[in-house]
């Protein structure tokens, strides 16, 4: 393969045949990798300029009914101290975040049945009432379609649910038999159909993953066309069944970010905490390869260390304000600037009007 030519075609057509994608995914040559990152950066600048959007992450529960083999908050991890934030504590995090310039709040947690649909709707409505110009993103895992509809009617704008891997065989290696890729995909299609701006994504370098599995991830994303695509390296956690597998590496993650940017120029792509954990300047390099979102932590400091999806997670000791200013510095050092706005995706043809109409329909229904 002539890599230079493949890069040009990927940028022009936003696509390549499977074999060529697999080769780019596995690219070793330093200069060609740099050319790929530069292309990712150029396309991102065409669409989004130097803007980097902020999402304030509130990790509100580390209870989880699932038992994903890679994840530190899996049900069977008996060593972990569990916590839940009250609705008041969650709203207080938003209050702090608002003052720091956040206009999107992401409520993320394990799959925790303690919060029923009414509780989630109540929290969403309260946040939307207090901060009407902010977007609310939910990341609560797999739910019934009806629950997703109710959250949407309550005002939730976006939903994050990584598909984790689009290969059936690989999915079964990462998850217990009780979980299925088909169901996860169905959740994503339901969310999109309801009217959410949907985020999906996957881990890079998870145990057993091949370049062809990553090609399948790209093909699935071409079908789903999510507004946001979040990826990060797999990082081992000592109290999971995957404790002895090596963590993913930064370069393969950066290559994937650049490839995603070329294939999905409009997408919101975060430079994730996992990327910053695997390497001290991982997030800056992520931005330079095409990422345009950062998600600093807004959770109260006393629970931060407990939302440990993987070992050595960064930002567990810092206050929200410290994380915010640390990230500002990092973003400007990388050559970009933080935008104080909701940071909606720039291709979605669904106008606000249309979304509001849909929200009204659901409200009448429930
Ligand atoms: N390493 C990296 N990422 C992980 N996640 C969960 N466990 C790990 C791990 N060990 C990611 C999953 C999940 C997101 C919230 O965190 O992709 O969707
Ligand atoms: Fe949290 Fe740097 S972003 S300490």
Image (cartoon, helix red, strand yellow):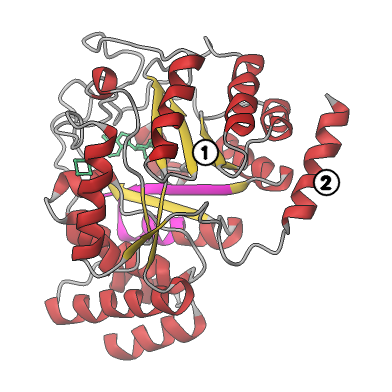
Q: Which of 256 and 351 is in front in this view?
A: 351
- Give the foreground label among 1 and 2: 2
The mark found on residue 357 in the picture is 2
Question: Is 248 situated left or right of 193 in this image?
Answer: left
Q: Which residue is drawn at 32% across and 21% down?
A: 73
Question: In which quadrant is the N terminus drawn?
Answer: bottom left
Judge whether 214 appears above or below 273 on screen: below
The mark found on residue 203 in the picture is none
Question: In which quadrant is the C terminus drawn?
Answer: top right
Q: Nearer the viewer, residue 172 or 317?
A: 317
Asked if residue 185 is among those painted magenta in the image, a careful observer would answer no
- Kindly indicate the quadrant of the structure image that contains residue 62: top left
Confirm whether residue 234 shows in the render: no
Please tell me which of labels 1 and 2 falls first in the chain.
1
| Secondary structure of residue under mark 1 | helix
Cα separation between marks 1 and 2? 31 Å
Asked if residue 203 is among those painted magenta in the image, a careful observer would answer yes
- Kindly indicate the quadrant of the structure image that contains residue 122: top right
Q: Give the range drawn in magenta.
A: 198-217
The mark found on residue 181 in the picture is 1
Question: Is 94 situated left or right of 298 in this image?
Answer: right
Confirm whether residue 217 shows in the render: yes
Q: Give x and y (percent) for residue 174.
A: 35, 34
């Amino acid at each position: 393969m002539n890599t230079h030519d493949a890069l040009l075609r990927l940028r022009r057509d936003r696509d390549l045949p499977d074999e060529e994608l697999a080769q780019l995914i596995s690219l070793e040559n330093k200069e060609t990798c740099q050319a790929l990152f530069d292309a990712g950066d150029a396309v991102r600048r065409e669409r989004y300029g130097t803007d980097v959007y902020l999402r304030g992450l509130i990790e509100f529960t580390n209870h989880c009914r699932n038992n994903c083999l890679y994840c530190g908050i899996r049900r069977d991890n008996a060593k972990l101290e569990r916590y839940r934030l009250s609705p008041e504590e969650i709203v207080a995090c938003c209050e702090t975040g608002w003052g720091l310039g956040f206009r999107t709040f992401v409520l993320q947690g394990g799959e925790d049945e303690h919060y029923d649909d009414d509780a989630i709707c109540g929290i969403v409505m309260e946040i939307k009432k207090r901060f009407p110009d902010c977007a609310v993103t939910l990341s609560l895992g797999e739910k019934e379609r009806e629950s997703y509809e109710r959250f949407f009617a309550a005002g939730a704008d976006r939903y994050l649910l990584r598909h984790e891997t689009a290969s059936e065989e690989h999915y079964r290696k990462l998850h217990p038999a009780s979980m299925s890729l088909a169901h996860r995909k169905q959740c994503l299609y339901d969310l999109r159909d309801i009217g959410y701006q949907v985020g999906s994504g996957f881990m890079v370098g998870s145990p057993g993953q091949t370049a062809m599995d990553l090609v399948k991830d790209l093909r699935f994303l071409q079908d789903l066309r999510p507004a946001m695509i979040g990826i990060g390296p797999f990082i081992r956690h000592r109290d999971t069944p995957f404790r002895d597998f090596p963590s993913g590496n930064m370069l393969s993650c950066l290559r994937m970010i650049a490839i995603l940017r070329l294939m999905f120029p409009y997408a919101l792509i975060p430079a994730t905490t996992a990327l910053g954990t695997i390497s001290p300047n991982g997030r800056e390099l992520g931005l330079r390869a095409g990422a345009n979102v950062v998600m600093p932590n807004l959770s109260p400091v006393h629970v931060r260390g407990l939302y440990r999806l993987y070992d050595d997670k960064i930002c567990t000791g810092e206050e929200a304000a410290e994380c915010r200013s640390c990230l500002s510095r990092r973003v400007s050092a990388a050559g970009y600037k933080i935008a104080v706005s909701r940071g909606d995706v720039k291709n979605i043809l669904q106008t606000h009007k249309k979304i509001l109409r849909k929200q009204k329909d659901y409200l009448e229904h429930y």
